[in-house]
Image: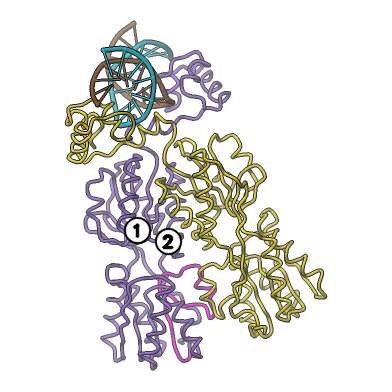
Chain colours: A yellow, B purple, C brown, D cyan
Amino acid sequence: MATIRDVAKAAGVSVATVSRVLNDTGYVHQDTRKRVAKAIKELNYSPNEVARSLYKRESRLIGLLLPDITNPFFPELARGVEDEVHQQGFRVILGNSDENEQKELDYIHTFSKNNIVGIISATNNPIQKNYGDLHIPVVFLDRVSDKHLSVYADGVQGGCLAATEMIARGSRKIAIIQGPPSLRPAQDRFQGAMQVLQSENVDVQVVQTNSFAFADAQKWANELFHLYPETDGVIASNDIVATAVLHEALRRGKKIPDDLQIIGFDDIPQSKLLFPPLSTIRQPAYDMGKEAANLLIKLIKKEQVDERNIQLPVTFIERETTRKVD
Amino acid sequence: MATIRDVAKAAGVSVATVSRVLNDTGYVHQDTRKRVAKAIKELNYSPNEVARSLYKRESRLIGLLLPDITNPFFPELARGVEDEVHQQGFRVILGNSDENEQKELDYIHTFSKNNIVGIISATNNPIQKNYGDLHIPVVFLDRVSDKHLSVYADGVQGGCLAATEMIARGSRKIAIIQGPPSLRPAQDRFQGAMQVLQSENVDVQVVQTNSFAFADAQKWANELFHLYPETDGVIASNDIVATAVLHEALRRGKKIPDDLQIIGFDDIPQSKLLFPPLSTIRQPAYDMGKEAANLLIKLIKKEQVDERNIQLPVTFIERETTRKVD
DNA sequence: TTGAAAGCGATACCAT
DNA sequence: ATGGTATCGCTTTCAA
């Protein structure tokens, strides 16, 4: 690997001058600039980011912390973040915390030891203290935070929407699956739906859960139909859970959506490929990722940011686990 | 952030000594060691990886390059890689090449500029030249390579298995979906299946495709049933394509598996949650990731590696898109 | 417009 | 057993 010294020597100038043309700072004569450019090309030189980072005490790396890359919602977020970050000349280093506080800390540590310039975190653990004494900007994604900026979808609104649409389509014995208590977005959805449900003349049953994992979801789905066989509508805490419910309902020979309506949350790519395709409340995951990246980069560049929280709208995606309404 | 100097001062020793206790190299008196340890704790000191990396010309970062994080197969791989890498004290920095050569190059560049110690690549592009002049170990994952080590599942065997099982279960007019031509694993599966299909007395139709994207898959599924309405068995190039086929078949009112059997490839987590659950050829994605990580780390540590290619076995997962056999 | 030299925060060689 | 110091590759004053 060629270094800045090699380039300087080849071009017959000092390293300072090479650095100047590299960073386009200070004065450099046209001819000198050309000679340097030529040397760079000939030596196929590319500056060592590590050395640069050591001196400047900052890299061009952004840390992205996800709770579970295996849940299809998060790759969608990640793609949004990545595309935007990449386009603005930064790179992302991704960590998967596995919803485990120790791993999360490990990653924050790794990030910080590698001079990362900012962090986007979508982790579940309510350990925002861990982000406090970092001296770099942090944006929470799909999470709300009082202390830090955050980008998220309107969960309350989403919950309302789900309940409203479900009632409008005729369900009267509705089971609602309450996601993990520690997860604010899940609780928002729940609250939103409950608001509507309780103000209407319908039966409502709550199924309490504490994770979004496939396997667990299947168990709860089973439990749901066992406990409340009369249920004619399920509002699930996300699409994975909704999928498990759908699956279990079909297994039990229920007609969807005639016997039972189901509404999910997230609109992960797979949802439209289910049979029947899942009606759901869509979160604009990709856009959320882009927004978060954008916001973070503004912070990094110390640009003015006018809003501390960016809340994106959710929409009802009508597919075939809900009945038609005229 | 405290530096090694601060620690040295606080402990009343030189930086050399601090470095010694940090790295556990050379002699250092017990008492001194204790004083240093105390200072480290008090100052909450943690060594700057960037400075360390600059001097040693290597980091503790491993680059993982994925073609499309949005395809659920890859997060599975990634988790395997990550878990193993993490456990062995390295960290992974993840790049998503989006099946785009330029992005792939960008990431390789980023990796190299950040003193990454090794790369695991699962990208599609046949541009192994790009990895040639890197001076660090590279392991290909879910890809086969002549020049570099690689870890992959036995595609030919998988194809054979799919064809054999399908015939054993009574399909006689079989359509096989040939994945992207540039993708060796997809072609292996195809070849494997064709071998069996052609040696048996069955009709076989080939549907040529060039991507694994959801949207495209849906189009081909449609085309398949339009062109070959008699088809009573489909061997798909992966589970995403199989899902699209299943979806389209149900939409057209076919009974699964009575009218039509479907076998996928990969066994992504969603496959078991489809309705009916998808029969498929399972690749042990998580384990493949772990193997690749293990192999790479051996290379990094310059340990002896005995096999240049690690081929993992595939298995037929019988679910409900295939008929029972007695 | 250019160059010399002082750092950035570690490691490791050479003394002592 | 410990310390001084050159070094990694770059950026940025300061002087010329």
Q: Secondary structure at mark 2?
A: helix
Residue B50 figure quarter: top left
Residue A38 figure quarter: top left
Q: Position of residue A14 (x, y in %)?
A: 23, 25
- Is the residue marked by circle 2 packed among few (<14), some (14-19), or many (20+) residues within 10 Å? many
Q: Provide the chain ID for the residue under circle 1.
A: B
What type is the residue that disc 2 sits on?
Answer: Phe
Q: Secondary structure at mark 1?
A: loop
Question: Which disc, if any, is residue B122?
Answer: 1
**Residue at figure coordinates x 35%, y 65% from the top left:** B153
What's the distance in space between the residues labelled 2 and 1, CA to CA?
9 Å
- Magenta-drawn segment: B258-281
- Image position of A214 (left or right of D5): right
**Residue at figure coordinates x 37%, y 38% from the top left:** B59
Question: Which disc, if any, is residue B74?
Answer: 2
Which is nearer the N-term, disc 2 or disc 1? 2
Marks 2,1: beta carbons within 8 A: yes
What type is the residue that disc 1 sits on?
Answer: Ala
> Hey, which residue is sitting farthest bottom in the picture?
B230
**Residue at figure coordinates x 72%, y 71% from the top left:** A163
Q: Can residue A241 be seen at all in this image of the molecule?
A: no
Q: Is residue A204 above or below residue B20?
A: below
Question: Which disc, if any, is residue B230?
Answer: none
- Image position of A34 (left or right of A224): left
